[in-house]
């Protein structure tokens, strides 16, 4: 007889639901018997521009070396990041996506009896990584769907080791400014590692949001996590990084699996960092697309949460599941966020002009019949 493996899992894991990814285009195409080329996916906050040509060329050049293990220290990419952002290379941790960084912090600093604090409606990776260690997730109610930074401080105690905050947050798109960040960091106890998740920072104009990297020298308990999977367009390769004090990076390096970042991701990330034009275009396409989506939603009489990311959480004021199902039948994939305690919302990623128009047209069809 087989054991009850769920009952054997640590209590935190028993309470988790698996992470829900955006529905793959191929899967919906199979279900609908539709040509994949006719399906629009605006469900995973992916870059609609396609990868940077510089990254593609770097991957091509690196292919003959695929029999070799990657550089496990990621020396060249760390040097590039350090020079590009004026940060200490000894404080950089490379990850298999920035999800890996979020998880490394949990594995290094959390255990049963300890806790991590984060906001309601925060990114799903935080509870997954926290509870996998047996630690407690302390979820603080949001204010207007955004982080209550004072509330997060109030939830901390002697057993708190990690605070996860995202600016802007996914799936809400909400953000906070430099004064709020400074106030938070200056009040967090020294024994709490703050993970400031800036996965979408490149979509805001310089100066619109606080640049977490600028706070590193004053806050040794701060780790800023960033990714090349969003504005840099490398989601399929899984590459992100943490920037922190060398001390925190040294701890994370103890739990990091050998070769956690693959060789193609390393070279593609270096090349993508050099393609400033690509990031600039990503920002412009996002800004224009955001305006297009907002105008279209407005015309349909819908409400949404203002966003500084490359996505919008749209509130239908009623169960959004049937609307999602109807959109899928139109070949449009967006993201239900009921798992984030937002059952009346759908999250839509900003796409190209044509993709946004297709989404708005399908939505109009669904809502107006
Ligand atoms: C997409 C996302 C990430 C980045 O994930 P990767 O592992 O780098 O693909 C991190 N945090 C948030 C809030 C995100 O939405």
Image (cartoon, rainbow, N blue to C red):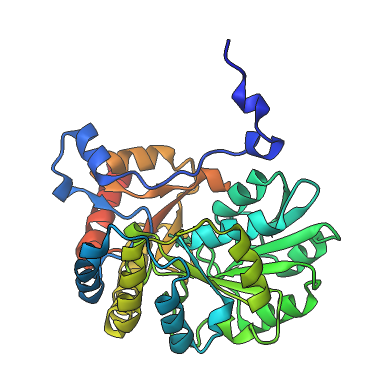
Residue 304 seen in the figure: yes
Residue 307 seen in the figure: no
Residue at screen point 27% across, 48% down: 332
Residue 218 on image: x %, y %: 70, 86
Instruction: Name the image quarter holding residue 97.
Output: bottom left
Residue at screen point 45% across, 67% down: 240
Residue 330 vs 189, above or below: the answer is above
Q: Residue furthest front?
A: 68
Residue at screen point 33% across, 46% down: 367
Viewer-nearest residue: 140 or 187 = 187
Tell me: 142 left or right of 80.
right
Residue at screen point 31% across, 64% down: 264
Residue 155 on image: x %, y %: 80, 59
Quarter in which the N terminus is drawn: top right
Tell me: 272 left or right of 224.
left
Residue 139 on image: x %, y %: 70, 53
Residue 29 vs 243, above or below: the answer is above
Viewer-nearest residue: 144 or 70 = 70
């Amino acid at each position: 007889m087989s054991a009850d493996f769920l009952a054997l899992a640590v209590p935190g894991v028993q309470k988790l639901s698996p992470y829900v990814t955006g529905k793959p285009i191929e899967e919906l195409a199979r279900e609908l018997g539709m040509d994949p080329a006719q399906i629009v996916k605006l469900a995973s906050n992916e870059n609609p521009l396609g990868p940077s040509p510089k990254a593609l060329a770097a991957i091509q050049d690196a292919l003959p070396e695929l029999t070799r293990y990657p550089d496990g220290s990621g020396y060249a990419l760390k040097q590039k990041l350090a020079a590009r952002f004026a940060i200490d290379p000894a404080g950089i941790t490379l990850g298999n996506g920035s999800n890996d960084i979020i998880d490394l912090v949990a594995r290094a600093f959390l255990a049963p009896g300890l806790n991590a604090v984060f906001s309601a409606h925060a990114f799903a990776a935080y509870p997954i990584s926290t509870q996998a260690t047996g630690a407690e997730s302390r979820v603080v109610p949001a204010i207007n769907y955004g982080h209550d930074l004072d509330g997060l401080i109030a939830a901390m105690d002697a057993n708190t080791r990690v605070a996860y905050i995202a600016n802007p947050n996914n799936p809400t798109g909400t953000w906070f400014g430099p004064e709020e960040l400074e106030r938070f960091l200056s009040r967090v106890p020294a024994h709490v590692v703050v993970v400031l998740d800036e996965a979408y920072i490149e979509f805001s104009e310089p100066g619109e949001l606080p640049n977490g990297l600028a706070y590193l020298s004053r806050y040794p308990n701060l780790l800023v996590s960033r990714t090349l999977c969003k504005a840099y367009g490398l989601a399929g390769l899984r590459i992100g990084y943490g920037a922190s004090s060398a001390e925190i990076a040294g701890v994370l390096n103890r739990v990091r699996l050998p070769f956690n970042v693959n060789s193609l991701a390393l070279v593609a990330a270096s090349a993508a960092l050099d393609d400033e034009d690509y990031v600039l275009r990503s920002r412009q396409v996002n800004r224009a697309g955001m305006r297009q989506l907002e105008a279209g939603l407005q015309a349909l009489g819908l409400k949404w949460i203002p966003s500084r990311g490359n996505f919008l959480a749209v509130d239908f004021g009623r169960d959004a599941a049937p609307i999602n199902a109807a959109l899928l039948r139109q070949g449009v994939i967006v993201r239900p966020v009921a798992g984030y305690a937002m059952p009346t919302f759908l999250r839509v990623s900003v796409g190209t002009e044509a993709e946004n128009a297709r989404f708005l047209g399908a939505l109009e069809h669904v809502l107006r019949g």
